[in-house]
Amino acid sequence: MGVYACGHWMPSKRHLVFSIYDTGVGIPNLVKEKVKDVHFSEDALRWALLPGNSTKQLHDGVPRGLGLAKLMSFIKLNNGCLNIFSNDICFSFNKGCGNFSFITKPIIGTFIGITIVADKNHIYSTSKEMK
């Protein structure tokens, strides 16, 4: 249906806030449809956050994209924030803590919001760039 993205640099806090909203079926619905033994939205989102898990891997056995686990790893490294709202579930990670909660009025699709802390003392790169 559509994908919407926006970002904002907050110079006084030195934060980059970036959001993306995909009006598709949503992560929980997609995982529950494609992965055996996953029947609940929280379990589906937990599965999607694990390293190596992607619903795209189920086609030809090759994952596609960096995935939520890589994003989560970067957010932890950066002391940033991650918020995911998808269908009837919400995951929030902030200050080293993550928690799940249910959304009383489910949304269509998935919203992912991240806050990246600008840090002059570190250079962030992929593992391939470090070699």
Image (cartoon, rainbow, N blue to C red):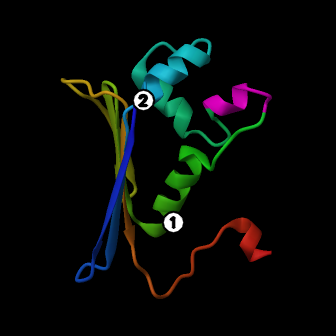
**Dot 1, crowdedness within 10 Å: few (<14), some or many (≥20)?**
few
Residue identifier under label 1:
77
Q: Secondary structure at mark 1?
A: helix
Image point (27%, 28%), residue name: 107
Query: Taking 68 as reference, is 1 above or below it?
Result: above
* Location of residue 96 in the rendering, given as x and y in whole percent from the top left corner: 40, 56
* Location of residue 17 in the rendering, given as x and y in whole percent from the top left corner: 32, 64
Image point (72%, 67%), residue name: 127
Position of 104 with respect to 56 (left or right) is: left
Position of 44 with respect to 114 (left or right) is: right
**Quarter occupied by residue 35:** top right
Q: Quadrant of the C terminus?
A: bottom right
Q: Magenta residues, as a range?
A: 55-61
Numbered label tally: 2
Viewer-side residue, 2 vs 112:
2
**Dot 2, crowdedness within 10 Å: few (<14), some or many (≥20)?**
some
**Quarter occupied by residue 37:** top right
Q: Residue furthest left?
A: 104
**Quarter occupied by residue 85:** top left
Q: Earlier in the sequence, mark 1 or mark 2?
A: 2
Q: Amino acid at mark 1?
A: Leu
Viewer-side residue, 114 vs 99:
114
Q: Residue furthest bottom?
A: 120
Q: Residue furthest front?
A: 1
Residue 24 is labelled as 2
Query: Taking 52 as reference, is 128 above or below it?
Result: below
* Distance between the alpha carbons at the discs numbered 1 and 2: 29 Å
Position of 60 with respect to 44 (left or right) is: right
Residue 112: in magenta span: no
Q: Amino acid at mark 2?
A: Gly
* Location of residue 60 in the rendering, given as x and y in whole percent from the top left corner: 80, 28
